[in-house]
Amino acid sequence: MEVKDFRLDNAIANYKSLPHQKRAIAFANTCIAEKGELNREDFEQFVITWRTPDESNASTTLQTSQRGMDLIKEFEGRELEAYPDPGTGGDPWTIGYGHTGSDVYPGLTITQEKAEQLLSEDLKYFEKGILGCISVPLNQNQFDALVSFAYNLGVGALAESTLARLLNEGNYQAAADQFERWVNAGDEPMPGLVSRRHVEKELFLST
């Protein structure tokens, strides 16, 4: 696990008395008491411990709530007939609530029931992606906001983002502030993305 981007001041500022955080601090205190310092290997172990929540505190049981699904539906819109990508005039073709893939082609039409089914199936992929790249505990609203973000921009974009790095350091507020950086289409802010990121940030910060 990379530790070069770990900010100790951010981590301590966002200390939440979580069991894995307490273990990390106890480990550091023991090293300093025994050796008089925290060497490179010790620091790496400290970071790993700090970033690895106990299974009981992990977000592995979370699924997108109805509130999260409604947010995605609102911003994705619903189309029961396949439509082309605005930028290419062709691939990728989209249908339902922003569903794309090899199963979508010109002339395809679906029912409302099928649109709901596709959304449910797509959400499983994005939920798994969130759990794969975020190692700190999340509440339901935080999870929903991240799923909406990834649904719009991709799991890869989230995984490689400063947002994910800050969040995995335990800096929830700084991570929330990153939502509003992802609003451009080309070189210009897109009103729809500005609105979506604002709603996602507010949801992420709500309790």
Image (cartoon, helix red, strand yellow):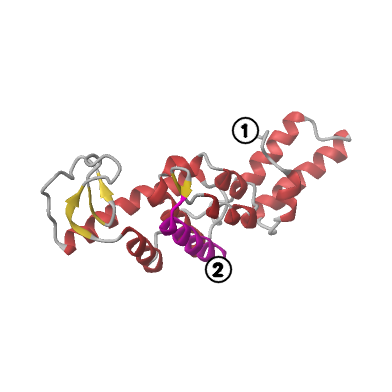
The N terminus sits in image quarter: top right
Which label belongs to residue 72? none
What residue is rendered at 71% in x and 40% in y? 46
Q: Which residue is mark 2?
A: 206
Q: Secondary structure at mark 2?
A: loop
- Image coords of residue 125 (percent x, y): 35, 47
Q: Camera-side residue: 11 or 106?
A: 106
Identify which amino acid the numbered label 1 is placed on. Glu
**Residue 102 falls in which quadrant of the image?**
top left
Where 194 sits versus 48, above or below?
Answer: below
Task: Name above or below for residue 53 compared with residue 44.
Answer: below
Residue at the image point whose x is 52% and y is 47% from the top: 134
Where disc 1 sits, the SS reads loop
Q: Which residues are magenta?
A: 189-207
* Residue 45 as seen in the image, left or right of residue 156: right
Q: Residues within 10 Å of mark 1 (few under 14, many from 20)?
A: few
The tag on residue 2 is 1
- In the rendered image, residue 36, in percent from the top left (x then y), is placed at 89, 35
Please give the name of the residue rendered at 66% of the width and 54% of the height, measured from the top-left corner. Answer: 19
163 or 22, which is in the foreground?
163
On screen, 184 above or below 91? below
Residue 203 lies left or right of residue 31; in this view the side is left
Whether 195 is among the magenta residues is: yes
User: Is 73 on the left-hand or right-hand side of 190?
Assistant: left
Residue 155 colored in magenta in the image: no
Q: Residue at x 60, y 47 (%)?
A: 168
Q: Are marks 1 and 2 in contact (CB under 8 Å)?
A: no
Say if residue 105 shows up in the picture: yes
What main secondary structure does the magenta stretch of the protein show? helix
In the image: residue 39, left or right of residue 184: right
Residue 29: % across, % down: 81, 44
Residue sitting at the far right: 36
